[in-house]
Amino acid sequence: MLFSSMSPKKVIYFDNAATSFPKPQPVIDAVMEYMTAIGANPGRSGHQLSVNAGEVVFLARQAIASLLSVRNPMRVIFCLNATEALNLAISGLTNTGDHVITTSMEHNSSIRPLKELERSGKITLTIVPCSRNGVVEIDELEKHVTASTRIMVINHASNVTGTVQPLRTIGALCRQKNIILIADCAQSAGIIPLDIQQDNIDLLAFSGHKGLYGPTGTGGLVMADDFDFSRMRPLKYGGTGSASDKVYQPAFIPDKYESGTLNVAGLSGLYAGILHVTSRPDGIHGVHAGKKALVRYFLDRAKSIPGFTGYVPAELIETGVVSFNIEGIEPSTVVQILAEDYTILARPGLHCSPLAHQTIGTFPRGTVRFSFGLFNTEDQIDTAIRALNKISTGKRHT
Amino acid sequence: MKSYAVILFYSHNYAIWAADVLKKQAIEHKLMPVPRHLSSECGYCVRIHEHDSHRACSLLTDNRIEFDRAETLGEA
């Protein structure tokens, strides 16, 4: 073995909002197949293996387009992750003097690029407060719209609370006011059914390695079929395998935004991951229902834990994410004991979302976050409940 | 001897997409390196039988798959 690790069979992995684990076997097989049988660079040569690599990328592109109801698969722009996709959309679209509206539930992946643009004086930014449950009121958003409001950036599902924003209603408002809607769907793609057209989204950032079960280093930005991308600047410039006689970046998609060799090994796995998720019973709807059931199961039993505080009612949690605290014990300590004594892996702290923690009243302490995935079971949750009961009463497992 | 045509694209991404559409319509085709005398592209184009050229181009247009042009390649 090249790397040190824990025995996967012993681990109870409740950190799927960071990245899903384990990956389904077909995902591993697909990466291996690309690495061993194809391995070439898509679009850079004309030989058969280059064609095969191009086909892999196309299959992944087509699968994402189908998942999100985009007719033109070339409107799927592959990036390293949702953060890079959000940076592409935000930096590519903002112009001097623009007003941007966002919410107090955003992840740093959008807050940081927005705050940087605000600090440089390029844009003005309004961060609209949300309820303690993490949901924004449409009237609150609307009252901040001005004549110079050009973009809204909305986190669909919070990585802290698992609650969702009413994207479709927000999108309708954006259409009415001629505002571009950038939706951060890092936490919802593959978990909640999404339809870019029906949900009135212009640009949708997704993560490939969370709810879609692809490898890390996969994600992207999806543009609605009617979105005019002509004024969206690329994040990076360089070789695309196209228009090679020109020294300027091509204007056509996806090449305009995809410079440098793509993560084809990762996209091989992403394609298999999408097939795995969508071919489950009842597809994404089934995944969604399964996650809600695990959250209900956990929160019902967590009530018995002395000093347990949850922050959002189970019925509002849509993505398998639960934030909580145990009275008198720091979240980092709880997570450390869970890992060392029970091999239960979770994430403490602020989860790269300081504003969301301010919104739900857990800043700067943060929370313990459990995030359930496809492979978690009620038995694992029972084990976690027993562990948390012992931790809350000061009894360490030996 | 058979006569061939090639369909040239602005990007290899569209060539792959076109091949997928042609395959579904059972139009015989092959992805191949772009002939240097036709373009300086480093990617690939789609080779088809010349007699399928009009049908193939119409199909791509119907599917809104952008392409540069079709060229007769001659006999092969």
Image (tube, grey):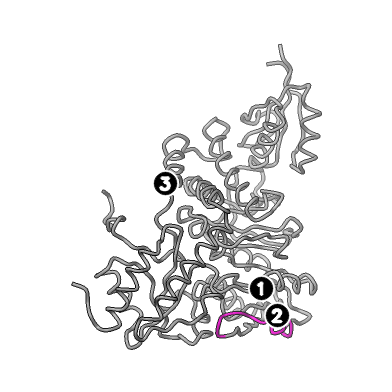
Q: Which residues are magenta?
A: A132-144
Query: Mark 2 belongs to which amino acid?
Result: Ile
Of A323 and A293, nearer the camera is A293
Residue A206 position in % (x across, y down): 57, 60
Residue A381, magenta (yes or no): no
Q: Considering depth in this image, is A89 or A71 the residue closer to the camera? A: A71
**Residue type indicated by callout 3:** Gln
Q: Which mark is residue A138?
A: 2
Q: Which residue is mark 3?
A: A25
Q: Earlier in the sequence, mark 1 or mark 2?
A: 2
Q: CA distance from mark 2 to mark 3?
A: 42 Å
Residue under the image location 57 percent in, 60 percent down: A189
Q: Name the foreground residue: A306 vs B17.
A: A306
- Marked residue nearer the N-terminal end (2 or 3): 3
In the displayed structure image, the side of residue A119 where residue A232 appears, left or right: right
For the residues labelled 1 and 2, say whether their Cβ atoms are less than 8 Å apart: yes
Circle 2 residues within 10 Å: few <14, some 14–19, many ≥20: some
Specify the quadrant of the image occupied by residue A225. Answer: bottom right
CA distance for labels 1 and 3 = 35 Å
In this view, A298 is above or below A85:
below
Residue type at the position of mark 1: Pro
- Residue A138 magenta: yes
Circle 1 chain:
A
**Label at residue A166:** 1
